[in-house]
Image (cartoon, rainbow, N blue to C red):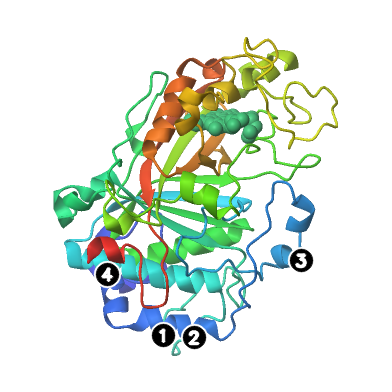
């Protein structure tokens, strides 16, 4: 049992987030920010030892060598927190991630606002890194020192998204719901478990080391106890490239090759960021729809499939990751996919994964581009003693309808017998926090 539980009032103990050891009692998320402590003072204190904000990690797809920079290894690089867009979306995927879905327990709109302020203050502190504030003798520590004497920024990104359920009657937000936000409904082959589906909030934590993600999670839980409760959680990771290029998934294929260019503002404005104007409410500009799908893979079954058939299921070469027309094992995974000379799908089958996801036809042009930012997961063994490994599928898009149309096209893809989507949800990733006076969801709440 946690030492500090003996110090929190009865009411606080009952509402402590399960699995966390609260450094602060229930409603501390109100006190800390209302009193102006956790936000500004803590940021300032940590700011003293903060590493210089450096450039975000280079694309860990095609510049894998660069990714193993000293700064990544020693955890001193930070991804800027403030900006028009939240970090953790266009940021090249880090190797460690945790998706945390929450039920919000804040009693009213005022408490909800304080919850977002607290989340903002902690995210600013954690992503900048620095020396934790000193505390008087005998007081609980201000940091668990999991990352050592100084909190390392370690490319940490904290990305906050809201689910459709936050817009029910509780906080009077109904009229401000993003136009396309809805609760995820099961597709034909889904086997959704409500215990790992949906949520009022989604917090995506990503960093270059697993301890940084765990540290951030414990810190956020401690500071927001009483304001929100974990509904489900999924840890994800990305493998190193083998041997070069985009990392592989559990099925042994390079995964994440064809994606919008996150450094191209025109492309991002077209495909990912919500733009100002109807039918979206004004506050959503700069946000994006986020889809998370927990997709289990049946790898024993998959491993029985001859490689040539696996390649036809996905529509890419297994060893190289190149399109089907490239037969050399050394072919580049960056070669373009082209179907104009293959209208019947003799080379790249019409019902393979990539051709259904993005058929390159005029009819599907408007619903073929999403930004995938997925991870692998391992929750083995399941209750029956079997492996439970798969894809923490995550994607961002300007319109939720794009994802839904794509998933509908994939309904009867050849991959279906080897996967089982079990959970996840639809969310709206908030616009960025622009400066130290701003906070998550400010424009939604005011
Ligand atoms: C277990 C589930 C999944 C696995 C193992 C998987 C794997 C892959 C692989 C290996 C590729 C080819 C390489 C690449 O371009 O990244 C790919 C491409 C792609 N996947 Fe998936 N995927 C899964 C689920 C999904 C879902 C749920 C969607 C969206 C509804 C999706 C959308 C796409 C798209 C858009 C592409 C690129 C198509 C292109 O433009 O060539 N995938 N996926």
Cβ atoms under marks 1 and 4 closer than 8 Å: no
Mark 1 = which residue?
41
Ligand 1 is within 8 Å of the C-beta of the residue at disc 4: no
Q: CA distance from mark 3 to mark 1?
A: 31 Å
Name the side, left or right, on which 291 lies relative to 349. left
Mark 2 = which residue?
45
Q: CA distance from mark 2 to mark 3?
A: 26 Å
Q: Find residue 70 and name its label.
A: 3
Q: CA distance from mark 4 to mark 2?
A: 21 Å
Residue 325 visible in rendering = yes
Upstream in sequence: badge 4 or badge 2: 2
Mark 4 = which residue?
114
**Where is residue 201 drawn, in percent x and y?**
34, 52
At 63% from the left and 38% from the top, the residue drawn is: 256
At 35% from the left and 83% from the top, the residue drawn is: 37
Quadrant into which the C terminus falls: bottom left
């Amino acid at each position: 049992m946690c030492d500090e539980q003996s110090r929190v009032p009865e009411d606080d103990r009952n509402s402590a987030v399960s699995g966390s050891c609260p450094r602060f009692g229930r409603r501390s998320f109100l006190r800390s920010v209302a009193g102006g402590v956790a936000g500004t003072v803590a940021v300032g204190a940590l700011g003293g030892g903060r590493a210089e904000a450096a450039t975000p990690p280079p694309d860990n797809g095609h510049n894998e060598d660069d990714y193993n920079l000293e700064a990544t290894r020693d955890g001193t690089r930070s991804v800027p927190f403030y900006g028009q867009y939240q970090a953790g979306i266009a940021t090249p995927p880090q190797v460690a991630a945790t998706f945390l879905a929450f039920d919000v327990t804040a009693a009213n709109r005022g408490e909800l606002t304080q919850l977002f302020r607290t989340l903002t203050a902690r995210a600013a502190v954690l992503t900048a890194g620095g020396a934790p504030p000193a505390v008087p003798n005998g007081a609980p520590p201000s940091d668990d020192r999991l990352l050592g004497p100084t909190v390392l920024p370690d490319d940490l990104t904290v990305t906050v998204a809201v689910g459709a359920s936050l817009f029910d009657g509780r906080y009077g937000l109904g009229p401000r719901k993003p136009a396309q936000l809805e609760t995820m409904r099961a597709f034909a082959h889904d086997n959704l478990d409500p215990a790992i589906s949906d949520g009022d909030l989604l917090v995506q934590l990503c960093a270059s080391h697993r301890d940084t993600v765990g540290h951030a999670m414990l810190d956020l839980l401690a500071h927001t106890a009483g304001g929100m409760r974990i509904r489900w959680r999924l840890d994800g990771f990305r493998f190193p490239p083998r041997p070069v290029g985009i990392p592989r998934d559990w099925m042994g294929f390079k995964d994440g090759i064809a994606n919008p260019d996150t450094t191209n503002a025109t492309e991002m404005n077209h495909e990912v960021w919500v733009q100002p104007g109807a039918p979206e409410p004004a506050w959503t500009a700069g946000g994006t729809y986020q889809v998370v799908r927990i997709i289990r893979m049946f790898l024993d079954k998959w491993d029985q499939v001859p490689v040539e058939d696996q390649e036809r299921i996905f529509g890419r070469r297994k060893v190289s990751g190149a399109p089907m027309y490239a037969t050399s094992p050394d072919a580049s995974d960056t070669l373009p996919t082209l179907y104009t000379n293959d209208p019947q799908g003799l080379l790249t089958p019409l019902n393979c994964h990539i051709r259904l996801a993005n058929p390159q036809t005029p009819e599907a042009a408007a619903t073929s581009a999403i930004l995938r930012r997925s991870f692998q997961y391992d929750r083995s063994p399941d209750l029956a003693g079997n492996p439970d490994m798969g894809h923490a599928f995550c994607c961002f898009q300007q319109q939720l309808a794009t994802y839904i149309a794509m998933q509908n096209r994939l309904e009867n893809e050849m991959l279906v017998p080897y996967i089982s989507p079990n959970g996840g949800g639809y969310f709206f990733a908030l616009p960025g926090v622009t400066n130290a006076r701003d906070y998550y969801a400010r424009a939604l709440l005011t």
